[in-house]
Image (cartoon, rainbow, N blue to C red):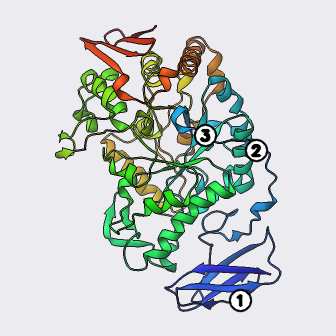
Amino acid sequence: MTELRVWAPRPGRVEAVVGDRRLAMTRDDRGWWSVDVPDLVPGADYGFSLDGGPPRPDPRAGHLPHGVHGPSRMVDHDAFVWTDDEWSGVDLSSAVLYELHIGTFSEAGTFDGAIGHLDHLVELGVTAVEVLPVAEFAGDRNWGYDGVGLYAPHHAYGGPDGFKRFVDACHVRGLGVVLDVVYNHFGPEGCYLGELGPYHTDFFSTPWGAAVNFDRVGSDEVRRFAVENAVHWLRDHHVDGLRLDAVPNIVDLSAVHVLEELAEATPGFLIGESDANDPRYFDLGLDATWNDDFHHALHVALTGERHGYYVDYEGLPDLAHVLTNGWLPRRHSPFRGRTHGREFTGSGHQLVAYAQNHDQVGNRARGDRLSPSHLRVAAALVLTSPFVPMLFMGEEWGASTPFPYFTSHGDLALGHAVTEGRRREFELGDGQVPDPQDPATYAQAKLDWSERHRPGHAELLEWYRSLLALRRATPELRDGRLDLVEVEVRGDVLTVRRGPVTVVADFGSLDVQVG
């Protein structure tokens, strides 16, 4: 006997749809509908009909094999045979993260395809992968931030068993897994949550529209939906930690913030994406946040670019301040048009540093990466920093493949709007910005693994390996105490001393020495 349940306070009648059968469900006083189905077994498909309408997928389905519009499939998570019993977890304070996108990390674009490149990561010297969102989204191609089936690993990647094989393979090789999850908005296509209940609120707005309802009328079950989703990834898929997308857009004015509930419910660590320079997120339970100040100051020092948010940064002086103080002090931000931030007083282990990530590459018009000469300098500073370092897939060999924004919305009007919005954002003419809906845009983002062995690329790869070996062998480089970092700026030369290691980077010639 299998009980099907769904929280749906809005419709007056809900039926479970199993094959050709429609089974009436019973509602309790909290808006939960339920029915016992005697012959529903793992592998069987089902859905829910609201007020006699077409079947909708289960918002908590563990598998959506037909995509966001199709029926849900029963999953028995206990049936998977794990081999990671000896895995002891990830120490974030000594971790080196490697951000990757499943669809473009391998030619196959699947979880199993990604497994084929894990040995490279072990040889490189990283300790954990940080995986862009894998929750079910519309179509086959997407960064993952348009997810609507938040409990279901994407069918085109290999579904729930494929993701479990990937995590298991990582653990067997000594690699941790951090999963990127999105609780600040839902994707624009295939999201039927609004038909079920008050998952959104117009009281707040986000860059993606109405905010997720974490503190208005009916929010208790929405909070529970997010918290139990986080638990699901750690319990049923064995991931070690979560990276929470855009936490300033997780709006909650209640006395107990939903981030606190997430932190209390999950045994793994939580990394937040935030450019707010707000240490209160650590009080809410986050173990670390991304450090955009480090990236932006480094990028300005390397490239001289000063458009957009880079207008707030002075290059080397700001980079020196970040290396010794965590992030920039509270000051006026010309980009925001207001005073921004608050002093950081914590450990470097609470900040994740990077020279590139999916946003900083993909949110450029063409998705272009830093040059190998830039990366040589950047790697020396990232991998000897007092922060938790993170690399973006392919940067270790100076991958020439871009990482542009790509989608595959089946809703053609939505797809056209995304294409035109992307062109307007960068104010470039037709054809100069890759069309996110064009399959060729996705195809060009796939890593070319043969590049690793070519002249120039092979030498850069060896540089990254050497720096990672130096970090492993030098306890001072894994020490998060910022007061032990000595920095000096003279003209275009930045000198950083950490224990026995001194890094001298000449930004005028883009040369670097590590001694």
- Left of 99 or right of it: where is 375? left
Whole-angstrom CA distance, mark 1 to mark 2, is 40 Å
- Could you tell me which residue is drawn at 55 percent across and 46 percent down? 132
Label 2 crowd (10 A; few <14 / some 14-19 / many >=20)? some
Please identify the quarter of the rendering in which residue 76 is found: bottom right
- Left of 166 or right of it: where is 204? left
Q: How far across and down, in percent of the image, does residue 478 sit?
A: 50, 26
Q: Which residue is mark 3?
A: 90
Please identify the quarter of the rendering in which residue 2 is found: bottom right
Whole-angstrom CA distance, mark 1 to mark 3, is 45 Å
Label 3 crowd (10 A; few <14 / some 14-19 / many >=20)? many
Q: How far across and down, in percent of the image, does residue 488 sit?
A: 28, 15
User: Height in image: 409 above or below 472?
Assistant: below
Q: Which residue is mark 1?
A: 23
Q: Earlier in the sequence, mark 2 or mark 3?
A: 2
> Looking at the rendering, in which quadrant would you find the N terminus?
bottom right
Q: How far across and down, in percent of the image, does residue 513 sit?
A: 43, 8
- Left of 450 or right of it: where is 512? left
Please identify the quarter of the rendering in which residue 451 is found: top right
- Could you tell me which residue is drawn at 54 percent across and 29 percent down? 401
Label 2–label 3 contact, CB within 8 A: no
Closer mark to the observer between disc 1 and disc 2: 2
SS state under label 2: loop
- Could you tell me which residue is drawn at 66 percent across and 36 percent down? 175
User: Of the residues shown, which amino acid type is indicated by label 3?
Assistant: Val
User: Of the residues shown, which amino acid type is indicated by label 2?
Assistant: Asp
User: Height in image: 439 above or below 320?
Assistant: below
Is residue 138 visible from the viewing direction of this image? no
Q: Which residue is mark 2?
A: 84
SS state under label 3: loop
- Could you tell me which residue is drawn at 71 percent across and 56 percent down? 160
